[in-house]
Image: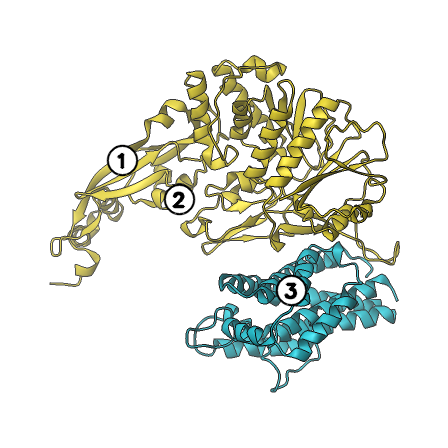
Amino acid sequence: MTEWADEARARQGLYRFIGAALLPPVRGRLDLLSSAFGILDEYDLDKFPYFIAWRNFVAVLDSDVLLEDLGIEYVRLFGVGFRGTPAMPAESNYRAPNRDGAVASFIASLQAEYRSMGLTSLASAEAPDHIATELEVMSYLCGVEADARESGQETLAKDTLEVESRFVRRHLGVWIPMFASRVLAANPAPFYDRASELVHAFVIHEDDYLAAVVAGSSEL
Amino acid sequence: MSTTVFVCGDSPELPITTPDAVVVEGLCRDPGLLRDRGTHPDRAVVVLHSESFDLSALQKALRSIGIDPLGAQVLDVSSDDDPSALSCQVEGLKQRASAFATSAPEHAKPVFSGAVTRRGFLRPPTPTYVAVPRVDDSTCAAGDGCRACVDVCPQDAYQWSAGRIVYDKDACVPCGRCVTSCPTGAIENPAATPAMIDAQVRAAINAAEKPIGIRFVCSRGSVDAKSGWADISVPCTSMIPASWLLACRLLGASCVKAVPCGDSGCPIDGDSIVTEANDIVLEILAQTGFEAAMVAGEPANDEVEHAGTNMFDQRNAADIVLALVASTGTNFTVESEMAQLGIVSIDDTTCTLCGQCAKICPTNALRESYEDEIISISFDAKACVNCRQCVAECPEIRRGAISVRGLIDTRRLAAGRLALNEGTVASCEICGNAIAPATMMNRIGDLLGEEFQDTMKMLETRCLDCRGRG
């Protein structure tokens, strides 16, 4: 195993971790997040600027978070209410023009992108443009990259890295800053304040970092 | 807010006189040793005596103790031999670090040294992170057409698109020219904010036992320390406006200078801009009796009063200039294409009073007003930043309707707002509402010619709403 593979594994875990933090809060999921933290923290995350946001989020996770309060806050921030949703956690809400059919068309093109990666979305899962889905897609790609590096398939690893970079630049890197800014504007509870800070810092870094690695790589 | 000075303890000669410095043995060789100190300050100054320290490792170590590396100040003293200047430098950096507010994720740009290859090593290279600017859309004037950052960027990192500025972080080699050229202060580099520069300059001057000079130097270059000068590091000295140098003078610096890097391989290539800024300041100081102090670096008039706060905010350039006039009792005039202030002139024989210049003016130096059926364009020299966007926008520019001179004229600054052109407005004969300035109607009539006299008559007498009526 190389350190390139280690890094891809760490990123795979981080995408999944952050995506889970932005799904509806249930006890089992919070417990998993707490246990996953210890594993992820063993990687050299302090190499990256999002480390401070990571530590801030973990500090909230370590504190006694009341599940019921968290659930109410989740619905207030991300659920559909009669006053609207302060920060809809779905890309089409930020990217698709406000006209008939635009959202469906946007999601169809996103699903086509998923199919090109060998993925399909289940009707029972979150929407294809939900934040957790998109983060999970990136987690999957990082997993493919890590597997490729561990088995010495460098061309596949490099190609996957390019797909990752493209997906972040086209999707997450565009709308996550807007989403995070809306969450912060809604005066969220500390858990979601720190979670949105973390997803923002992580995604922006991924966008820059992957682009720089892809641009600078000659033999990856 | 606590700020700690970490000093590498490997060199016993390291002439640091900061009493509360934390000495770390081996810090130059292994920045990770910062983790073992058990201190967790909010901000840090790191003093090293080696040019070859590992910056990415230092940034990693700072993060691990909770410090944002973009706000930390690093001082390499390997070429420094003046203990008194060093203590001023450290005190200045301490205040600069303390004035650091925060950075957003968008402000950090990863930089790899060389190509990322696997043949040489099996581990991913650790990038270093440099601070890059970010545009605050809420205060950016691009919606009105402002393109000041697009015009000054030497890397074409900015583009104007449909009323928004699109910033390409990958293309940006941070020089800071966009920051100090932005008329609305909407662009900020968190590592060199006006507040941080202000804090550092004041602290360095106050900490000095005798009057010292202030030099702005490029953070990428290597400039040997010089006795009697305190160095202020900035992304590129071509970002330094003349008002920053004057502000240092007002704060009590015996001499001031922006140092051209002289690096022929630098992609920013800003030495001519630096020289021009220095020349503007030299000219101003010469006219106000300070030339000797500027050039020779000798103590100057200590009675100079400064202009208050935000002295390094480029939008306050006129206040800095007027403070200098108040201190010296001398008015002056300096003309340069690159002056931070400008004087707009309008030719009332060709201007149609269309108001496009006022609409695009990002600082409201040009303003359109309409009262008692008179439309006027007025100008306040104090607000003009010589961005020349009014010229670029003017539809009558080929006939020379508007021009801007890069001119610092202190009498004009003190004169306040003056009317540049005014005229009557044609009114609708049906509803009485204003149609357009009479000069604009005349111009349209000239363009249409006699063939369209009937059309012209309708245009001149009916407003848009009433043109279809009997």
Viewer-nearest of labels 2 and 3? 3
**Mark linked to residue B74:** none
Quadrant containing the N terminus of chain B is top right
Near-viewer residue (B350 or B188): B188
Residue B331 placement: quadrant: top left
Q: Are marks 2 and 1 on the same chain?
A: yes
Amino acid type for the residue under numbered disc 1: Asn
Residue B17 placement: quadrant: top right
Does residue B250 sit above or below A135 in this rendering? above
Chain letter for the cyan part? A
Near-viewer residue (A111 or A140): A140
Does residue A83 sit above or below B376 in this rendering? below
Name the residue at 71% across, 22% down. Answer: B84
Give the residue at mark 1. B421
Does residue A109 sit above or below A157 in this rendering? below
Name the residue at 48% across, 33% down. Answer: B309
Give the residue at mark 3. A60
**What color is chain B drawn in?**
yellow
Viewer-nearest of labels 1 and 3? 3
Badge 3: how crowded within 10 Å, few (<14), some, or many (20+)? some
